[in-house]
Image (cartoon, grey):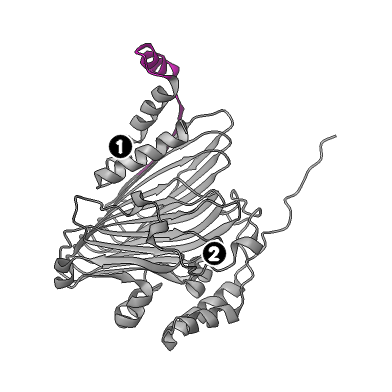
Amino acid sequence: MAVVRRRSASPQAPRYTRADVEALSGSLGEPSWLLERRLEAWEHYQRTPMPFMEEEWRRTDYRHIRWDEADRLIRANGATAADEPGRNIEPLTGDEQGGRLVIVDGKVAQFELADRLVKQGVIFTDLGTAVREHEELVRAHLLTRAVTPADGKFAALHTALWDAGVFVYVPRNTVAELPLHAVCFNTATGAAFGHVLVVLEDNAQATMQVEYASRQSDKQSAYIGATELIVGAAGNLRYVSLQDWNRETFEFSHQRGVVGRDAQLDWVNGVMGSRLTKAFIEVDAVGPRANARVSGFFFADRDQFFDLDTQQNHNAPLTNTDLLFKGAARDNARTLWQGMIKSLPQMQQIDGYQVCRNLMLSDEARMDSIPGLEIEADDVACSHAATFGTLEQEPIYYLMSRGISRPQAQLMIIEGFFDELLQRVPFERVRQRLVEEIKAKIIG
């Protein structure tokens, strides 16, 4: 006789209190407006139930997180930049670095900024310093225009408890020719609330890469993060985000780019690590002729689960968004991509495109892709697609007949599958490192 089993109770919440919010703000010596903003977000967090069966969450079960381990706030414990793997902090191009910021366990461990960028008025610093030294800029943009507490339970919690982050500001009519590089690394286990805020004024340009990683551990951790990319009119931002958390980290993040009139955002997002990742990745095209290209690559193995929820919002006419995600899964891993293109009424002559291509490397892996359109205008060119495939044996046998081992032959084909996306990473050294990480997942 078949027995119908109902899903058990909704997920438990982390064990924070209002006092934790007040203590954090006090320890950072923050101005009153920021404490007020945190407490407003805390009240919103308290009123919002833990997400569970809502449409964007119902396929994602994170009830196995152990909050008694994962919600302990990470604090600096003496670790330095020397504890960070050297490959993550090497210069992105040549020997000259525009700026490098290494944050270890929430504390700045290394910082440098090229004099030529300083003379241009470029600001590149940790978010705590930015609050003290550039208060008006931070107040105007932090969690007000891109990510807000209303975006969800974890967005509200992040607004209340963010504790470390990166701030970038490029003034009007300024080209930051040298790339900026930020690394967030955790040696301790527990909860981190990292934030990235990038603001490009009108006709400004910049290139930036941010990396997330953590030391291996058998204890669980949580990363409850946010990324805000604000590109002014005629601005141009190239932004690369690479995530490689350890296998006991649960990520819950909200990431959004806001693209103004005649502006360009080229955003590459890579996910390789964590036990579970639930990421909302969104672009808002808010000015006529805004253009956004979003490229994502992900590779899950063993018991990893990646849930990537993307949205392209056309909030102005004559806008263009182009999204391409490519992913692979092996062993018992699972991936889920949910995509949506939205347009408001009267947002005519928009062009939205989204596709997710999936490569399944084992019979036990599961990959789901759910594209969608929500169009309220009638003069548009919008399309979506999702494809699935496996490694074909014929090219593998061909390569093996030339003396190449089966694992190496598989690797060559998988590299070819990802090459289109890897070429969108603007740094050769980084592309080489990503190929090595793919190799490690295939060959070990």
Please report the residue visible at 33 percent of the width from the left and 65 percent of the height from the top.
110
The disc, 2 or 1, on the residue closer to the chain's N-terminal end is 2
Nearer to me, 410 or 159: 410
Q: Can residue 401 be found in the magenta stretch?
A: yes
User: As displayed, is residue 289 above or below residue 173?
Assistant: above
- How many marks overall? 2
Q: Which residues are magenta?
A: 383-405
In this view, the residue farthest toward the right is 1
In this view, the residue farthest toward the bottom is 32
Q: Can residue 406 be found in the magenta stretch?
A: no
Is label 1 in a helix, a strand or a loop? helix
Q: Disc 2 and disc 1: Cα gap in Å? A: 35 Å
Is label 2 in a helix, a strand or a loop? strand
On the image, numbered disc 2 is attached to which residue?
191
Please report the residue visible at 54 percent of the width from the left and 82 percent of the height from the top.
23
On the image, numbered disc 1 is attached to which residue?
420
Q: Decide: marks 2, 1 in contact (CB < 8 A)?
A: no
Q: In the image, is 116 to the left or to the right of 217?
A: left
Q: Report crowding for label 2: few under 14, some 14 to 19, many 20 or more residues within 10 A (C-alpha).
A: many
**Residue 14: % across, % down:** 62, 66
User: As displayed, is residue 256 above or below residue 437?
Assistant: below
The N terminus: image quadrant: top right
**Residue 59 visible from this viewpoint:** yes
